[in-house]
Image: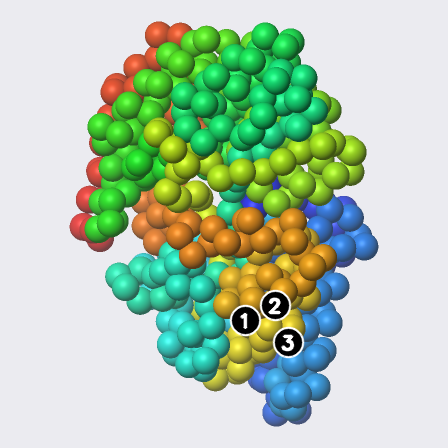
Amino acid sequence: MQRRRFLGLTAAGAATAALAPALTACGSDGGSGSKTLRVVAADYGDKAANHSQNYWDALARAFEAQNKGIKVEATVLSWTEVDKKVAEMVASGKAPDIAQIGAYADFAASGKLYSADQLLKIPTQADIIASIARAGEVGRVQYGLPFVSSTRMLFYNKSLFAKAGIVKAPESWDELQAAAKKLQTAGVKIPYGLPLGPEEAPAETLLWMLSGGSGYTDHDGTYTINSEDNLATFTWLRDELVGKGLTGSGEPGRTNRQDVFDAFCKGQVGMLNGHPTLMKQADAAGLKYGTAPLPGKSGKAKATMGVADWIMAFKAGGHREEAGLFLDFVYSTKNVLNFTNQYDLLPVTSSASDRMRADSSKAHLKPFLEQLDNAVFYPVDKTSWAKVSKALKEKIGSVVSKGGDPASVLGEIQREADATELAGAGK
């Protein structure tokens, strides 16, 4: 994985990765008759003090105290390497018992994972928010267990809005364009930040597809990348936003999300799509900002994008019962909140979400939380998604440049997606 992509967290890098213990083989039975679960997880911290190894170690010791005869050994790695390392372990026949990483579909499709109903107690499984649980399904069977989540909203700079005479956040594309023009006239460097560069192009793309009434797939899971709505969306972006100089002087196809976030925190961006982590950055910069639902084609968008990272349990170690007990413990309300509160992320269970809503210190997260039930996720259940995502990162930026051809580029990505799907079905 490159720099943390979906939830907006940066990888801790080699220094913090060095804190983690060496990777070992899959779960085994100790000489004392105890069973050992090997867990590999990702780091959400940005320094040693909040390295996620601390969370997993404390969780493991607490679990062991309640479950005699089961040991848990957790290895936490940076996002730049954890997915690759787990894939290598699986390929070499040394899969961990449990992995908390970015994707599960390939492992599920090849029959390497236990399903959720083979692992979790019914109350635990029922507590997972339905919209996120569905994103973990392959063939209507849930294999990916969501770990943490996030949604997106429109962020705007209140000071720049006041300077430009804008009295409220835009709710439609016309209002967005009008606000961007006022910001442009007021001398704002980047009226609307449009990061279609390789760091997170699939996210910004999906947000605009949703605001235009479409998405990557339809209700049946069929790719709709070159739908009429999507073609209209990117034609509007090319002509009415980028073409009118409302996204600044840089090329959106070469603009990465973190660059726009940094510019926003410096007071150089009027509006952009963002997630909860941006609030921490903006607060640290002393920026006065607001958040609002995504503007849609003719009014507020009906849905926003949701993102999640995943936990999965591998069959290789044969520790289904022990893994299930541990995962029930992971998903207890207390443990879910212990993690999400540390990193300002959203919980994936209804019980933890209810607790967060009732916590006055988390009021800033409530607008993001309220969107989870109707959020639309990447089609991560498709083994083809990795190739489609790569194609989007490479090509989608050209669509909005001068002379860009939405029909040609979206059609090309659609054909590649369909071909990858067909090849996967033929295996």
Q: Pointers 2 and 1 in contact (CB under 8 A)?
A: yes
**What residue sits right under mark 2 in the picture?**
355
Image point (54%, 54%), residue name: 369
Q: Nearer the viewer, residue 111 or 400?
A: 400
| Element at label 1 | helix
Q: Alpha-carbon distance for marks 2 and 3?
A: 28 Å
Tell which circle, 3 or 1, labels the residue nearer the N-terminal end: 3
Whole-percent x, y for residue 288 in the image: 72, 32
Q: Judge left or right: residue 78 versus residue 170.
A: right
Q: Alpha-carbon distance for marks 3 and 1?
A: 25 Å
Image point (71%, 51%), residue name: 45
Q: Which numbered circle lies on residue 293?
A: none
Q: Is residue 278 visible?
A: yes
Whole-percent x, y for residue 162 in the image: 66, 22
Q: Amino acid at mark 3?
A: Val
Q: Amino acid at mark 2?
A: Arg
Q: Which numbered circle lies on residue 72?
A: 3
Count residues near mark 1 (Cα–Cα under 10 Å), then give few for <14, some for 14-19, many for 20+: some
Q: Is residue 256 visible?
A: no
Image point (70%, 24%), residue name: 159
Q: Is residue 49 above or below residue 332?
A: above
Whole-percent x, y for residue 88 in the image: 50, 54
Q: Amino acid at mark 1?
A: Ser
Residue extending furthest toward the right: 49
